[in-house]
Amino acid sequence: MDFVAIDFETANSSRNSACSLGAVLIENGKIVQRKYSLINPEVPFHRFCTYIHGITEETVQDAPTFSQIHKSVFDMLDGHIIVAHNAGFDMAVLADSCRARGLAVPNSSSFCSVEMARKAWPEMSHHKLNSLCTHFNIPLKHHNAIEDATACAQIVLICAEQFGAKNIDELQSILAKKAKRDAERRKAELAALRKMEEEARSEVEAQM
């Protein structure tokens, strides 16, 4: 099981405003490297974002810009499967941050641990990162990029172990089949329920 779990925090609603990054490299199912960096986005912060993650313009005034950390980010991510909790957001931040500066975007596929969790554990009422961490007793300082990335990696490893998957592709295949079976079962249960309701209604009408 090899992949890199990432998490970005942003200064505002723009995907090109990364203010911190956490990245966790997994090789053979083990955490082998963790990287964390504050990032100076060189744009104003929105107070709501600061409320969420606690990072301010003063916090990052001496931090490197995205251009300055790009090489180390690229080297870590390029060619790897990138996992994130709500991968669409983090992959957009990565791509927009690179393209806005004329930098190479890592050639990587992505895997969303939110979608994974929904298919793996549909009985759970919430699939947010903090909810999953509570369920699996994973310590978490939420909205700290390296904490979120680490927790994301741990949840994927738990899921892979539970379903006996040796890699991300295999895990995707297993969960896709499970989701199809679950949908068919729900459809059958709904049909059975409707049949029971119809039979009960027919009995009532016959007695009238």
Image (cartoon, helix red, strand yellow):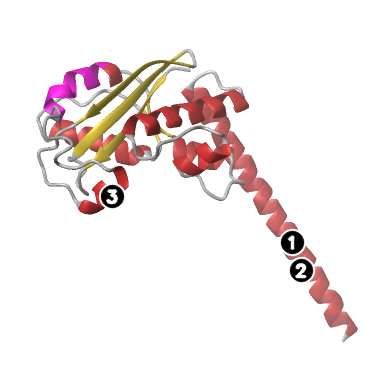
Mark 1: which amino acid? Leu
Do labels 1 and 2 touch, CB within 8 Å?
yes
How far apart in space, not on screen, are marks 3 and 1 (Cα)?
A: 47 Å
Mark 2 highlights which residue? Answer: 197
Report the magenta stretch's main SS: helix
Q: Name the mark on residue 51.
A: 3
Count residues near mark 1 (Cα–Cα under 10 Å), then give few for <14, some for 14-19, many for 20+. few
Distance between mark 1 and mark 2 Cα atoms: 6 Å
Q: Residue furthest front?
A: 58
The secondary structure type at the circle numbered 2 is helix
Query: In which quadrant of the rendered view does residue 79 lie?
Result: top left
Position of the C terminus, as image quadrant, is: bottom right
Q: Residue at x 24, y 33 (%)?
A: 20
Residue underneath mark 1: 193
Q: Mark 2: which amino acid?
A: Glu
Residue at (25% x, 53% y) in the render: 48
Q: Are marks 3 and 2 in contact (CB under 8 Å)?
A: no
Q: Which residues are magenta?
A: 66-75
Q: Residue type at mark 3?
A: Tyr
The percent position of residue 205, horizontal first and vertical second, equals 83, 81
Image coords of residue 76 (percent x, y): 28, 17
Q: Please provide percent x and percent y for residue 155.
A: 50, 31
Residue in the picture at 20% in, 47% down: 12
- Image location (x, y in percent) of residue 88: 33, 40
61 vs 12, nearest the viewer: 61
Magenta stretch holds residue 69: yes
